[in-house]
Amino acid sequence: MKRRRMIRCAVLAAACAVLMLCQGVMAKGNDTNYSQVNGTVASGARAKYTKLRGKGKDKVTLMIYMIGSDLESQNGMATADLNEMVYSGLGNQKVNVIVETGGCRKWRNSLISAKKLQRWRVSGQGVGLMEEKPLAPMTEEEELADFIRFCATEAPADRYILIFWDHGGGSVSGFGHDETYPNDTMNIGEIARALKKGGVRFDFIGFDACLMATLETAIAIEPYADYMIASEESEPGTGWYYTNWLQMLNENSSTNTLNLGRRICDDFTAKNTMYASAIGTTLSVTDLSELDEIVAKRLASFGLDLTKQLKNKDYMNVAKARTGSREFASSSRLDQIDLVDFCNRLGSAESSRLADAVRSAVKYNRVNNASNAYGLSIYFPNYSLRSVNSMISLCEDIGVDTGWTEGLRTYAALEQSGQIAAGSSQSWGSSSGSLLDILLGSGSSGNGSYDSSSTPSLLETLFGSSADSYTDSYNTYDSYGSMSESDIYDLLSQAGYGSSQGSSYGSSYGSYGSSYGSGYGGYDPYGPYGASSGSLLDILTGGYTSTDGLYYGANDYSSVLPYDTMDDSSAGGSLLGLAADLLFGRAPVSSSTLTLTQKDGKHVLELDEEMWEQIMAAELEVFVDDGEGYLDLGLDNVLDYTDEGDLIDEWDGTWLTLNGHPVAVYPVSDEDEDEDGLYITTKFIPVLLNGERYNLLVQFNEETGEDTVLGAEKVLSTGVQERGLTQPGSGDRIQPLCDYITYEGSFEGCYALGDELTVPADGKLTVANRKITGGKRCLYTVRLTDLYQAHYWVPALEA
Amino acid sequence: MPERPHSRKVKTEEGYAEVKKGEKIETTVRASERTTEEAQKSKDRDEEN
């Protein structure tokens, strides 16, 4: 007993020492910048693959995989970086820099061809062609593998470095947007396979791309590199600065890797602060040798602990921690969050252990205007569940322990169940309690047409007089109590959920039928295809469809659910039963509870505290009736509360304008903090910028009302993040846009909102509220979002 | 006051802004959508309805 206690103390002391060291190298307070490199290596880390000879004796081969994309064709960013490399004055015979170019419709120099893939040697004199081949997608793993093999053959070295250059989309979307083959990216699993085929182990792998500093990326590339240098957040278009660190390498090819990494991070931060200080930047150096034995194992334990928490009906605590976590590329809803920040907010023993491990593995971190960014992010679903199944598959592909994926699956299932139980939908013409009902003032059918004999909402069905008690083949349940799987399937089919998964995808699901599907609007709870489908059933049960078309899941829990889930004493012994327990044991938020009362001459919404605890966002939504339909001006979190905490549902008749022009506005996030800890709200304004579809991003300081127009974000077809924001300048034309809804509740189209504005000579864009005019009348309502990301609307009022 | 969802402070300026519908815009991504994936989801929902 005594000996065990001593060992535990020794481990605790070691953990404290690591934590203190990390805190010592970090600046104070909320600032996550490192003041110096953390040169320690955690106990249990593997040996480094690359062992430097030292004293400038090392031969170095630096490979740069440069997919030019629109970064080059529109803005010449790749040419600029190639010039930075040349300016470093490379001339050391021991240092070889080889670049592969491609993936770009037009190179902004007279040397590189857009019609071929080319490989170049870069020196202080310029770039010299080594090889060229026919154009091919640079997002193909075989092309990357071939490039690696080429470089290793042409320039064998003691030390290899690989840089990925282009757009990035994090763990969800992967790397690369090839302009010449635009509909694909290289996901993290493909990157890992390419590295394996390349047959080289790297000193470090860098991503001069957005969002690639994820734990999933680190785990995937760990077998092939000692360090990773990447950014959690989107990178500005100017990207890394190459001159100084290549000079360091040129002067001493044995330069310590962490010192090189520090130079890269410092120069990147300085360069981009100079050009665009309002846009946050991050760049970190992660020691991959600490990943496998330490970080990955703690991730698995954390995942198992998370699942336990969720099964103990602690969804609210997890959801709040998740919603409050520092998020990256918020406007793209990639659900990528800072892992340490998430762990800190959860505050459990397992989350703290994981946070310690991550902070130890991140050896250097630089941020600018980005709070709570500790160096490594992770995918955790919240705003969108569309990527859950593909991310779980990816995790399995790259060897992430199932302890973690079980946690993801459990959380996603509960969130999805919460949305379904709420009967809410973000689309027009959904089941009653929807926005359409609010606007039209009564129930409507689910297909967009007005119908006074509406389908009751799911909650009305559950809590109405028909639900006193019922017995199914498993148990007898009291009203409002737990429900069987078959009842939940019935609910799902009433909600019409799942048919969007099934309708366009044929009948590849094989011989098990759609007994739940027929007569229910086409819903098939088994889904037309397995784990990759994203069907609710797949998420809930972890089922999948094998290649023989047989579904393993609902009727064979032992094959897909962990044994302790089978033993769970909650209803049905399954995840579905857990979802039912959790959801129907809580105080329901439904449209019937969202009634307005009058206090001091104002309309207010009174909810009890248990319901308020479930509400994550409250936004004013305004519609202008122009006599033919509704112009949707979007959502703004501008609501006030009484001292007692009742929401005041009043509108002052003003709305956001851009240089005096009215705009539609939508939320991106409202949980970020600036360096002083004040909350920041970020929103997007849909526009045409010089005729092209962009979203203008605006940040508001919630305390002071100060706003910053961050820039315009273009969305790429592959889902990767645009690197950097476009800054509208003098003479640019901005046309605000809005959605237009018919009186029948259908989306009719996207329209220009008001007149086009031209950015003035001083480039200033001002956002402020003004009184709005026009239209026959205005309707306003409040949209509430609960911790399951379900939406509810209060009755609309006429202004 | 008990904890409530965040609200931003409004900065109001003098003057009016006229809301009116202009030309229809040909775009696959609605004003309320941030990404092409969301646009595809809307399209799937519309087809289903």
Image: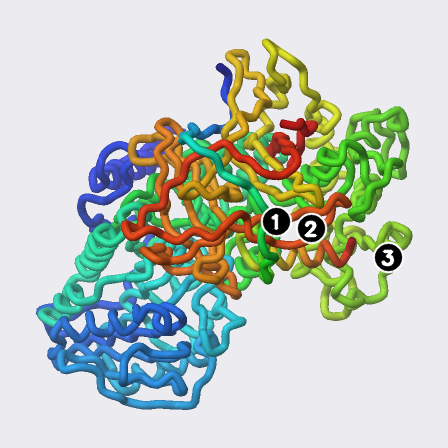
Total numbered badges shown on the rendered structure? 3
Taking depth in this image into account, of A46 and B21 the one nearest to the observer is: B21
Dots 1 and 2: beta carbons under 8 Å? yes
- Relative image position of residue A647 (x, y in whole percent): 57, 20
- Relative image position of residue A709 (x, y in whole percent): 37, 45
Which badge, 3 or 2, comes first in the chain's sequence?
3
* Label 1 element class: strand
Q: Which mark is residue A514?
A: 3
At label 2, counting other C-alpha atoms closer than 10 Å, the crowd grade (few under 14, some 14-19, many 20 or more) is many
Which amino acid, by three-letter code, is at mark 2?
Phe
- The residue singled out by tag 1 in the image is A739
Taking depth in this image into account, of A770 and A39 the one nearest to the observer is: A770
Q: Is residue A544 left or right of residue A145?
A: right
Q: Is residue A342 visible?
A: no
Q: Which mark is residue A747?
A: 2
Which amino acid, by three-letter code, is at mark 1?
Asp
Taking depth in this image into account, of A769 and A195 the one nearest to the observer is: A769
Quarter-of-image position of residue B35: bottom right
